[in-house]
């Protein structure tokens, strides 16, 4: 028999964390890994639009790390030590930093804030960056409310948003899209 996607167990607004603990679907922990899932989907969309083979490989690696983060956030922290869960590593952050530095070597120095836009790939990458920042804010909020979040998750999301900003600029550079400087209205 084929696996059914619907279980009907969430019809009353509850869901289970990894480990079996039932929580409301509005619980901040559900919001955190749901936002990471949204981010992963946007990164898939960015990857579908990029032509740079190296960046596409890195984005697949990032998507894998986001599944790791999602599973960490979806896990009942009291039960996680008893389970085999994939781990995020400091090297994952180092990879993002190296990629940022490499892309920055080919980009012109920024002289002002830039507006998202100029090409659909650039805009989509900025949307992914914004979703990443939201995921980071939710995780920080959890931490501030004494709900366990691995500090490496917050660090990774912070660095990933930086990576996505630079990737948006880099994609625009490769596509020949002109950056749009923000020109504040001054009276």
Image (cartoon, rainbow, N blue to C red):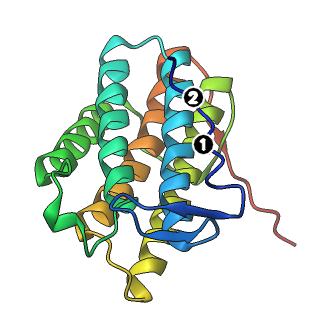
| Of 168 and 133, the residue lying toward us | 133
One can see residue 124 in this view: yes
The quadrant in which the C terminus is found is bottom right
Residue furthest out toward the right: 187
- Gap between marks 2 and 1, in whole Å? 7 Å
Where is residue 112? Give x, y as percent: 56, 53
Left or right, 145 with respect to 7, comes to: left
Left or right, 152 with respect to 127, comes to: left
Residue positioned 23% across, 46% down in the render:
97
Which numbered tag is attached to residue 49?
A: none
Residue 186, by quadrant, is bottom right
| Of 75 and 134, the residue lying toward us | 75
Residue positioned 68% across, 29% down in the render:
118
Where is residue 22? Give x, y as percent: 49, 69
One can see residue 112 in this view: no
Where is residue 61? Give x, y as percent: 28, 30
Residue furthest out toward the front: 1
Where is residue 91? Give x, y as percent: 12, 47
Is 174 located above or below residue 124 in the figure? above
Which numbered tag is attached to residue 4?
A: 2
| Crowd around label 1: few <14 · some 14–19 · many ≥20 (10 Å) | few
Q: How many marks?
A: 2
Left or right, 160 with respect to 85, comes to: right
Is 7 located above or below residue 50 in the figure? below
Residue positioned 43% across, 34% down in the render:
167
Q: Which residue is mark 1?
A: 7
| Crowd around label 2: few <14 · some 14–19 · many ≥20 (10 Å) | few
| Of 145 and 92, the residue lying toward us | 145
Residue furthest out toward the bottom: 145
| Element marked by disc 1 | loop
Q: Are marks 2 and 1 in contact (CB under 8 Å)?
A: yes
């Amino acid at each position: 028999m084929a696996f059914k996607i619907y279980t009907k167990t969430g019809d009353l607004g509850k869901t289970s964390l990894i480990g079996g603990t039932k929580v409301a679907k509005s619980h901040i922990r559900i919001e955190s890994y749901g936002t990471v899932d949204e981010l992963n989907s946007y990164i898939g969309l960015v990857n579908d639009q990029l032509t740079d083979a190296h960046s596409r490989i890195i984005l697949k690696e990032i998507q894998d790390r986001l599944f790791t983060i999602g599973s960490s956030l979806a896990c009942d922290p009291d039960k996680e030590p008893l389970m085999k869960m994939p781990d995020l590593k400091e090297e994952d952050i180092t990879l993002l930093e190296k990629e940022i530095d490499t892309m920055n070597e080919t980009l012109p120095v920024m002289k002002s804030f830039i507006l998202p836009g100029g090409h659909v790939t650039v805009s989509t990458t900025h949307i992914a960056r914004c979703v990443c920042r939201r995921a980071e804010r939710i995780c920080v909020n959890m931490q501030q409310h004494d709900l366990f979040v691995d500090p490496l998750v917050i660090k990774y999301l912070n660095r990933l948003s930086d990576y996505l900003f630079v990737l948006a600029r880099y994609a625009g550079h490769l596509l020949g899209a002109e950056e749009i400087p923000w020109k504040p209205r001054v009276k």
